[in-house]
Image: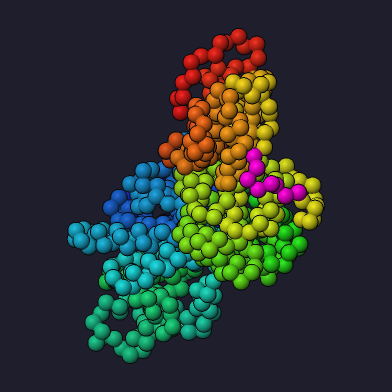
Amino acid sequence: MKDVGPLLPGVNSPADVKRLSQEQLKQLAEELRSKIIRVCSIAGGHLASSLGAVELTVALHYLYDTSHDRIVWDVGHQTYGHKILTGRGDRIETIRQPGGLAGFTAVSESEHDALTVGHASTSLAAALGMALARDARQAPYDVVAVIGDGALTGGMALAALNQIGHLKPQMTIVLNDNEMSISENVGAINHYMRTLQVQPWFQRAEDRSKQALTRMWEPLGEFASRAKKATRRFFDPASNNPFHAMGLRYVGPVDGHDVDQLLYYLDHIRQLDGPTMLHIVTRKGKGYKVAETDPIAWHGASSFDPENPIAKAASHTWSKAFGDAAGKLAEADDRVWVITPAMREGSGLVEYSKQHADRYIDVGIAEDVAVTVGAGLALRGEKPIVAIYSTFLQRGYDQVIHDVALENLDVVFAIDRAGLVGGDGATHQGIFDLAYLRTVPNMSVAMPRDAEQMRGMLKAALRIGGPKAIRWPRGSVPVPEDLPATEWREVEWGAWEVLKEPGSRDGAVWVVGLGPTVAYALRAAEGRPKVGVVDGRFVKPLDAKLLLDLAEGASAIITAEDHTVLGGMGSAVLEALSEGGRSVPVVRLGVHDTTVPHGDPAAQHEELGYGPTAIGRTLDELGAESAGSGRAAETLEVTR
Ligand SMILES: Cc1ncc(C[n+]2csc(CCOP(=O)(O)OP(=O)(O)O)c2C)c(N)n1
């Protein structure tokens, strides 16, 4: 078969993929790979995972028709190839950019995206639901779930397998095993999968597998006894195979970069009854040397020069400041532990994990487990810090209430990525945690405005005890002085801080900021004598005494937060004013009951009305103009 030039420009839909010959698919996969590298080099993205799934993507689109068949990609971060093959090639360069394609699959983006995702481990449950719906309506479509070995560590995925093996609908589960989560994968199933690949019978069985597979749907009686044995071994390789034990047919492991093999197995499996797991082995970053060598650095890449690729690592981030702080706290107290649900790199814990390996736990993508392991440690007198992203703590909410808060246990929640997060978009926005945490009895919720305060809060939280949540945003922060934890100044728990006094408190407009909005408020208040600025760094316990003092004589209070206003800091302020019997107009700035897509956070803060310019506009509306602007104070209108 001779090449017919570049294929990708002529492939704008799955129908175009199907028009190619099977021999051309390898070339299509390579072209897809080059395009993904180029796209990620421009603006970054989930490079390594998408490269590893290229052959699988091509094979799936060759066999299935995603305008009606449902392919449910777990997390959805590996779908750059899928997006290109499903009519989005012309916009793929906009991925994760403001107004561009989403970084994950999204039902609202394309009919070819079966599920809106971003969080891991949901594919199997969703695919089960789809298969049940199909069977209830006797509809003629196929359901395929694609899940990585990392995502399989999530309890949701395992619980869904349990149901799938019980209900046994026809479906294919592709287990894309590259031995990696973002960092090296963890857990007992992961270990089991490693042993599976080195068993000598596997090599022999793989050689015989095609023959065995062909015979799968022959009447059982026709099986020759040798073929029967080979089939059994390949399909259910060991009696203790956990997937087999859960009621699934298991096939594999198979080379996930061999399009012919993938087509062969996928095509046969879809003709079998019930659920079948096809275990494929792939290499994360496949086909791009740097990404293959260092898939951790290239999991989520920043822009790079494709000729001279160097993975950029941000240096002075909040995450790094936390990791350093955790290391110092663990040095000072041997009861301090750090638990991460599969986010070692993102949470700044690489150094910590080496220095304090005996008090570091990566539980896999299992946020619920992270929280309750913390509870267990605390019950035995240890001092756990659960390091977790705001958006992922949503997965551990019941555990926060039920396992930690009810007994007022000493668990510190170190919450990263609080606020808008940028390219990851709607599924990852950390804008709900204040609301869901401050309603929990015994829980404290705080947000530092700089890394020194973060350290002071962590230190105080560990000393005081009880459930304490400390949150910070994504992004950079100046590095604080390098001091041992014993020399850090604790932040007074529950105390707000006045950062700018107005000319007179009488008739003043106060802006209460939180984290990044503190700096915004200070900027907006510059040159405005009527305006005072407060750091509302404790949302719970709120500094009600100071708040009520400030409210006395104030003409208005503005709260600004990188969070939904429903249940957030502004709501807490309103509640405290109401309970304290103070009546003062309050304008709450923040996210107003809406989803927020991917974008540039600073620009979005302005658009959503709580960036520095937007706060300034609100101050103008409230009659708190700059000195000398000459505009008279107008009737107060609380518009937001
Ligand atoms: C609930 C949840 N926790 C954490 C993450 C962050 N995360 C994104 S991808 C990923 C690793 C997934 O590994 P795997 O499923 O094996 O896919 P691979 O990238 O290796 O192809 C993690 C931990 C997430 N998306 N969702």
- The image quarter containing residue 419 is top right
Residue 224 on image: x %, y %: 31, 88
User: Is residue 608 a member of the stretch shown in magenta?
Assistant: no
Residue 575 rendering spot, x and y as whole percentages = 49, 39
The colouring scheme, among rainbow, by chain, secondary structure or one colour, is rainbow
Residue at the far top: name it. Answer: 630
Query: Which x, y percent locates residue 48?
Result: 55, 56
Count every numbered label the image shows and give the total: 0
* Region rendered in magenta: 489-496
Q: Is 9 in front, or is 280?
A: 280
Can residue 522 be seen at all in this image of the molecule?
yes
**Vertical placement of residue 91 versus 221, above or below:** above
| Res. 54 visible in picture | no
Residue in the image at 29% along x and 86% along y = 223
Quadrant location of the N terminus in the rendered image: bottom left
Q: Residue at x 25, y 79 (%)?
A: 218
